[in-house]
Image (spheres, rainbow, N blue to C red):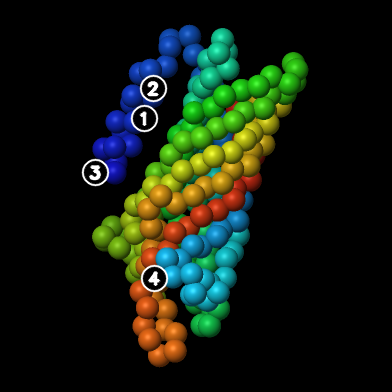
Amino acid sequence: MMKKIFAAILLAGLFAMPLHAQVSFGLKGGLNETKLSLNQSDLEESISNKSGFFIGPTVRFTLPIVSLGMDAAVLYDQREGEAKDTGEKLQQKSIQIPIHARYGIGLGTLASLYLFVGPQFGFNVGGDTEKQKVSDWSLKTANISGNAGLALMFANHLQVSVNYNFALSKNAEYKVIKNGIENHVKVKNNAWQIALAYYF
């Protein structure tokens, strides 16, 4: 169902683009600073957050008349968390597909500032079961999140961006034993992201 929704959104966006839109392809990569959010706040101190990375191809659609556009990417994304009491690690590997609407502000002939916002669709890799099991972690195979951020484009080719990626659905469940009581905690994987992209 998630794949059908994503396909419909992507097709609608592509068909909405005027024929004169400028299209650029490129490569994007960057770092995640993960923040795992638990639905039981008193257990959040049991989780240690880790840095991760992402990389993959990207495409940009620009409407030069109104400074509006879109971008999309297919990214291999890796994030980590760690249980402080056992040292046990959660390593989430996924394919992330962000789709952004963007608005540009010219800063002269060599640079432009862009504001962007949009959904991101994630699919875990490495398993084909309903849930992937990693010891006390239970990872969902698909999730949806959102992005909001800004980017600085140099010479219409090199882009540096920062954004906040916030989970709109749970990424996992985590079994925590505290004071002899077993708790099943819902986990959302949020992250600050810094990225570098080059468009050809």
The crowd level at tag 3 (other Cα within 10 Å; few <14, some 14-19, many 20+) is few
Q: Position of residue 175 (x, y in %)?
A: 38, 76
**1 and 2 marks in contact (CB < 8 Å):** yes
Residue type beneath disc 3: Met
Q: x and y percent of residue 44 in the render?
A: 51, 71
Whole-Å distance between the Cαs marked 3 and 2? 20 Å
Amino acid type for the residue under numbered disc 4: Val
* Label located before the other in sequence (4 or 2): 2
Please identify, in this view, whether the residue under mark 3 or under mark 4 is nearer the observer.
Answer: 4
**Residue 83 at what x, y percent from top left?**
51, 76
Instruction: Examine the rendered structure and indicate whether residue 175 appears above or below residue 139.
Output: below
Instruction: Give the secondary structure at mark 1.
Output: helix
Name the residue located 38 percent from the left edge and 24 percent from the top edge. 13
For label 3, the SS is: loop
Q: What residue does disc 2 label? A: 14
Q: Which residue is mark 1?
A: 10
- Amino acid residing under circle 1: Leu
Q: How far apart are the two marked residues, 4 and 2, measured between alpha carbons?
A: 39 Å
Which one is earlier in the sequence, the residue at label 3 or at label 2? Answer: 3
Circle 4 residue? 185
Q: Earlier in the sequence, mark 4 or mark 1?
A: 1
